[in-house]
Every structure is written in C-alpha cells, then in structure tokens.
Image: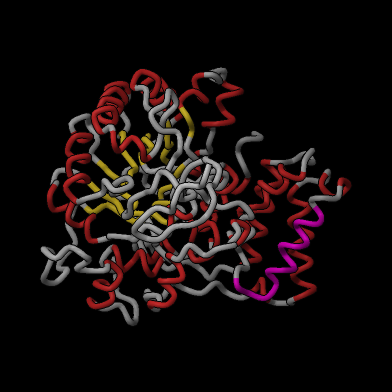
C-alpha cells in the first residue's frame, strides 16, 4: 500500500517495552514522519518521538484523513512516543485516547518547551512548571483515560525558580497524578528574553541533579536531556553499556556527568548509576550529524556489530523510501525541502557537503526538476557529490568512539549568546526547536535573563 514503504517489510523494529536507553528528542519541523523513517534506517531500537501536537489540533481534525496528517505513523517507527501540548485535563484525556487508538507506545506531556504562551487558554510547555497542580491533574486525567504510559518532559525550573527543592516538589506533585517517568532537560528555561534556541544552550546544565532525583524518588524513572553531544557521550552517561571502548574510564564517566556539580553538599565519587535512570535523549546531534547513530543499536543496546554502512547505501535506501512515500512531484519548494531535509546533515563537516546541499537546494527551485519528485532531486544531489568528490559516499561510517569532553573554551563558546548567529547554522536549515514559538531577539547571560526591550 502507499503507506507501506518497501524497506519496511525487511526492517524489524525495536522492542517497544524495553528500557529507552537512547531517545530521539521531539523537535518541531524535524521529527516528522520522513525524519523518523530516516532514523530507522540508522537505528531500529532507539525510541522515536513525534513533533509536539497541540490538543486542539487533534480535536479539530478528528476525521481519519485529517487526523492522519498529525498522528499517522508506520509500524517500523516503533518504539514511538507521541508528545502533546496543552493544559486542559479533559481535552488532553480525549486526545490521549486518540493517540492510544493510533497505536503509540507512550504519550508525553510537554512541560519543557520555553513557550511564551503563559497563563492563557492554550498554555503549554515550561510555564506549566509554575502550576504543578495543573500538570498533576492533566496527568491524572490522561492516565485514567488510557492504558499506555503517560510521561512528562520538563526542565529543572523556570526563570529564578529552579532550586533543587522546587524541582523535587514539582516531581513529587506530578507523580501523584500517575506519572512514573520524567524526561528532564537538565537546565532551567528563561520564559522572557531568550529564544528557544538560546534556551537550549545559555542556561547552564546541571546533570548531577538528575541523579539526585533518581535517588530521592526510587519508585520513579528518569531520563536526561540537554547538551548530549554524540553517542560516545551517551555511553558515558549510561555507564558504558556492554564492553568498554578504548579510552572509556571511570574518570571519563565522571567528567561526562559533570560530577559533583555545583552543589556543595554533593561529594564523594560518582559511584554506580541508579537503576531507575532510564536513558539519554539526544536532539540536535541526531538532526545535524545523523550518521553517528548508525551503530547505536550495538554500542548502546548490545546488538551484534552491524555490517559496515556507507553514506551511499543510506541515501539509496532513503531514496527508495521517497519513491514510495512521495511518488508524485511536489507542488512547492517547501514540500521537497521537507522530504529531503532529513539527509542534509549526512556529509556534515566533510568534502562533498556543499555540493550535496547546494545541488538539492537549487534543483528543488526548478519547477521541471521539482515535479519529478524529491527522490529525483536526491538522486541528482548524489550525482553531484560523486562528480565533485568521488568516493566520499562509499567510505565506511566510523564506529562510535569514547567520549571526548569539549575543551573549556569550546564549552564557553557553546553557552555564549553569540551575537549574529543564525539559525541556518543547523543542518536542516530550520533549527530543531524545543517549541514552535518564534524566536525572540538575542541577548543575555547564562545566569540572568537579558534586559527587556525598551518599549
């Protein structure tokens, strides 16, 4: 059928009930169906997440044909989580039932997006951390309505309210509603003055506080999000699952966790990770340099070592998918861009990257080329790379290596406001945002929000 790509019949999905050691973060205009299928060409077992879907979007489009646009997915995408946005318990309970009927493995409430929609009818995201009883009631209503797990993705806090006591109180209250798993972006959010992109890098990370929560709430589960650089970093955060790679030491694990952190009361060695620490979520890394995930099933989940993978094989398999999923020519440049966008980081930092991206971008703007479909545009981009840099697509992808902590100067650059930086620096041309809000003006520091714009 049109919704059953040929590759799907030969691909086995991961066990949807296993521990979600590796989770691909929800990102607006990134983790849509094409991107999720592309991820499945790299990893069968990582947990995939949808873009956030607002409750009213579903309730206003309950007809199957319309609802499929927002909630439809393919069997190969399991294990998969649907993230919802909203703050109305009755609406979200109804939408959770729709999500369950679609076959999702889990439904998640977005309490982590630094949204500007605060204390309004359509409130969602991190501002809800200031209304923990509302979040508790939403989770309670959703949990009563469905059998699948209902989880919460949040931050450590909001604005100046981000103490360990605040986070503990939030978790304790929301858990009363039935949430058993918290996925926590290990930094706070500034609701005013910082853009969503800046909220991913400027507020400092506090990884050790996730371990504190694991130990304070042994009956709950926790996953960590924020600043995870690559699969080697994820391995260090997970305690080096399986056999250790060259260079993986206890000191490296301690460094990856930033132990003991800034809390003066936290001391002693890192020690064994709590058993209720569930997994690691990675976002921009999967979008900007997706090829790093090609051996994650072996390096994180312990599967047998895969056969060598090349970028050509990956692109050819995705081209075959595009022929099935988008058989007709696209009417707009945007439609072709979204279909090809998952591949735009495949040559990041390598020869051929410019030829690949420029060719795809120029051809999708030519009507005659665009009307032949995204698979055709991708094929032409592949040929351009072969002409400009023969052999680059046939080089074997490198295996996961031990985590290399960034130098202090690199870390400082990562958290600096960076005047003039454009979102186009992201591989996809559109940044993977924590929420769909438009970005605000840049400015600010790591510990205090920027001054408000003059009226």
Nearer to the camera, 357 or 115: 115
Q: Examine the rendering and report whether any part of residue 45 can be seen.
A: no
Which contiguous range is marked in magenta?
A: 349-363
Q: Is residue 356 magenta?
A: yes
Residue at 34 percent across and 81 percent down: it is 246
Q: Position of residue 342 (x, y in %)?
A: 61, 53
Residue at 57 percent across and 74 percent down: it is 396
Check the image and tell me how it is coloured.
secondary structure
Residue at 79 percent across and 60 percent down: it is 380
Count of labels shown?
A: 0
Nearer to the camera, 155 or 240: 155
Residue 185 relative to residue 353: left or right: left
Q: Position of residue 177 (x, y in %)?
A: 22, 29
Q: Which secondary structure dominates the residues rendered in magenta?
A: helix
Q: Farthest front residue?
A: 455
Name which quarter of the figure residue 85 lies in. Answer: top left
């Amino acid at each position: 059928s049109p919704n059953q790509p040929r590759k799907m019949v030969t691909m086995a999905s991961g066990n949807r009930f296993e521990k979600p050691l590796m989770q691909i973060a929800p990102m607006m205009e990134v983790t849509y169906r094409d991107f999720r299928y592309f991820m499945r060409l790299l990893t069968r077992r990582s947990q995939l997440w949808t873009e956030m879907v607002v409750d009213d979007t579903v309730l206003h489009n309950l007809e199957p044909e319309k609802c499929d646009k927002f909630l439809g997915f393919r069997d190969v995408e399991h294990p998969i989580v649907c993230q919802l946005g909203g703050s109305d318990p009755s609406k979200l309970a109804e939408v959770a039932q729709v999500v369950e009927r679609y076959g999702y493995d889990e439904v998640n409430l977005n309490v982590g997006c630094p949204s500007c929609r605060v204390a309004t009818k359509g409130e969602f995201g991190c501002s809800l951390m200031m209304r923990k009883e509302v979040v508790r009631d939403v989770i309670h209503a959703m949990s009563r309505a469905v059998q699948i797990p209902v989880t919460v993705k949040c931050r450590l806090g909001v604005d100046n309210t981000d103490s360990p006591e605040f986070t503990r109180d939030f978790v304790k209250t929301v858990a009363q509603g039935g949430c058993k798993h918290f996925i926590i972006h290990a930094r706070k959010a500034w609701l005013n003055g910082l853009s969503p992109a800046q909220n991913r890098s400027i507020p400092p990370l506090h990884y050790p506080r996730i371990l504190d929560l694991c130990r304070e709430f042994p009956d709950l589960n926790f996953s960590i999000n924020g600043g995870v650089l690559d699969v080697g970093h994820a391995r260090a955060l997970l305690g080096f699952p399986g056999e250790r790679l060259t260079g993986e030491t206890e000191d490296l694990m301690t460094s990856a966790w930033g132990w003991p952190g800034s809390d003066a009361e936290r001391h002693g060695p890192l020690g064994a990770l709590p058993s209720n620490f569930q997994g690691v979520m990675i976002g921009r890394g999967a979008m900007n340099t997706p090829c790093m995930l090609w051996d994650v099933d072996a390096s994180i989940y312990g599967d047998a070592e895969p056969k060598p993978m090349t970028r050509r094989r990956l692109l050819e398999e995705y081209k075959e998918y595009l022929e099935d999923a988008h058989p007709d020519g696209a009417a707009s440049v945007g439609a072709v861009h979204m279909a090809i966008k998952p591949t735009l980081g495949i040559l990041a930092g390598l020869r051929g990257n410019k030829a690949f991206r420029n060719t795809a971008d120029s051809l999708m703007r030519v009507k005659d080329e665009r009307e032949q479909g995204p698979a055709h545009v991708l094929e032409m981009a592949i040929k351009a790379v072969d002409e400009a840099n023969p052999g680059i697509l046939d080089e074997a992808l490198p295996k996961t290596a031990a985590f290399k902590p960034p130098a202090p100067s690199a870390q400082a650059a990562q958290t600096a406001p960076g005047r003039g930086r454009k979102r186009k620096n992201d591989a996809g041309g559109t940044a993977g945002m924590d929420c769909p809000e438009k970005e605000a003006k840049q400015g600010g520091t790591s510990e205090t929000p920027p001054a408000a714009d003059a009226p």
